[in-house]
């Protein structure tokens, strides 16, 4: 049998519910703007907010690119489009699929902080912690994952595989 890293649909759904419960505990009765980082976070964000009832949920998006059609980060983050909602004085949670070198989230955190939110936290489904190049941590983490190239559940390789309902290691 080939051994390929996989996170099952069931494991992901269970973890997403756990993160939703943590967020409900931390923000119960408050209003929170969830800012999804496109494109990768769209599925995680959709599942996450559908598990949240005790918080007033608002949704916005931001889009960046860094990778191109490669499995290695270029290190340069480009802002494709910014948020459209006024974030000033609001609780904001930035929602991202995976924290890898940290360059993307560091860039986004600095960008959103300039909009003067009341608070700013980061939620990621996956944390490829061994690969960090800049010091940044997420406040909500689904799974710490090994240094393998992963696809599915929003994550792509050259825009493919985002629709796979679980996460798997991509091998040649
Ligand atoms: P960072 O800036 O290196 O932290 O990279 C973050 C971005 O790189 C994520 O938003 C993903 O789009 C992409 N990325 C990092 N690792 C993977 C992976 O294993 N599979 C697919 N995309 C990844
Ligand atoms: Mg990507």
Image (tube, rainbow, N blue to C red):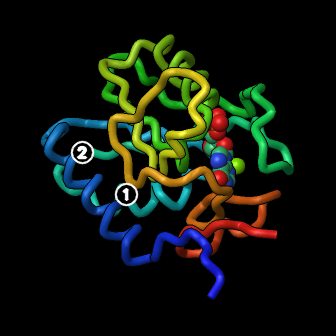
Question: For residue 48, which quarter of the picture?
Answer: bottom left
From the viewer's perspective, is residue 145 above or below residue 172? above
Question: Element at badge 1?
Answer: helix
Q: What residue would you read off at disc 1?
A: 48
Marks 2 and 1, the one that precedes in the sequence: 2
The x and y percentages for residue 25 are: 14, 44
Residue 160 is marked as: none
Look at the numbered discs 2 and 1 and tell me whether their residues touch, using CB distance below 8 Å: yes
**Mark 1 CB within 8 Å of ligand 1:** no
Q: What residue would you read off at disc 2?
A: 23
Q: Residues within 10 Å of mark 1 (few under 14, many from 20)?
A: many
Asked if residue 153 lies left or right of residue 115, the reply is: right
Q: Quadrant of the N terminus?
A: bottom right
> Is residue 40 visible to us here?
yes
Picture residue at 34% right of the left edge, 60% below the top? 16
Asked if residue 6 lies left or right of residue 1, the reply is: left
Q: Nearer the viewer, residue 81 or 101?
A: 101
Asked if residue 168 lies left or right of residue 29, the reply is: right
Cα separation, mark 2 vs mark 1, equals 10 Å
Hey, which residue is sitting farthest bottom in the picture? Answer: 1
Question: Element at badge 2?
Answer: helix
Number of callouts: 2
Picture residue at 61% right of the left edge, 33% below the top? 101
The x and y percentages for residue 159 are: 78, 59
Q: Nearer the viewer, residue 38 or 58?
A: 38
From the viewer's perspective, is residue 165 above or below residue 122? below
């Amino acid at each position: 049998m080939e051994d390929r890293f996989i996170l099952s649909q069931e494991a992901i759904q269970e973890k997403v519910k756990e993160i939703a419960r943590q967020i409900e505990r931390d923000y119960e009765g408050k209003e929170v703007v969830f800012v999804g980082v496109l494109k990768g976070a769209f599925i995680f964000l959709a599942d996450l907010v559908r598990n949240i009832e005790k918080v007033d949920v608002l949704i916005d998006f931001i889009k960046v690119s860094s990778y191109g059609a490669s499995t290695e980060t270029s290190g340069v983050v480009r802002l494709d489009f910014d948020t459209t909602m006024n974030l000033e004085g609001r609780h904001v949670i930035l929602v991202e699929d995976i924290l890898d070198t940290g360059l993307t989230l560091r860039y986004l955190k600095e960008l959103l902080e300039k909009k003067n939110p009341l608070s700013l936290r980061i939620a990621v489904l996956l944390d490829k912690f061994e690969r960090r190049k800049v010091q940044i941590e997420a406040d909500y983490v689904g799974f710490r994952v090994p240094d393998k190239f992963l696809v599915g559940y929003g994550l792509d390789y050259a825009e493919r595989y985002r629709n796979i309902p679980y996460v798997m290691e991509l091998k040649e």
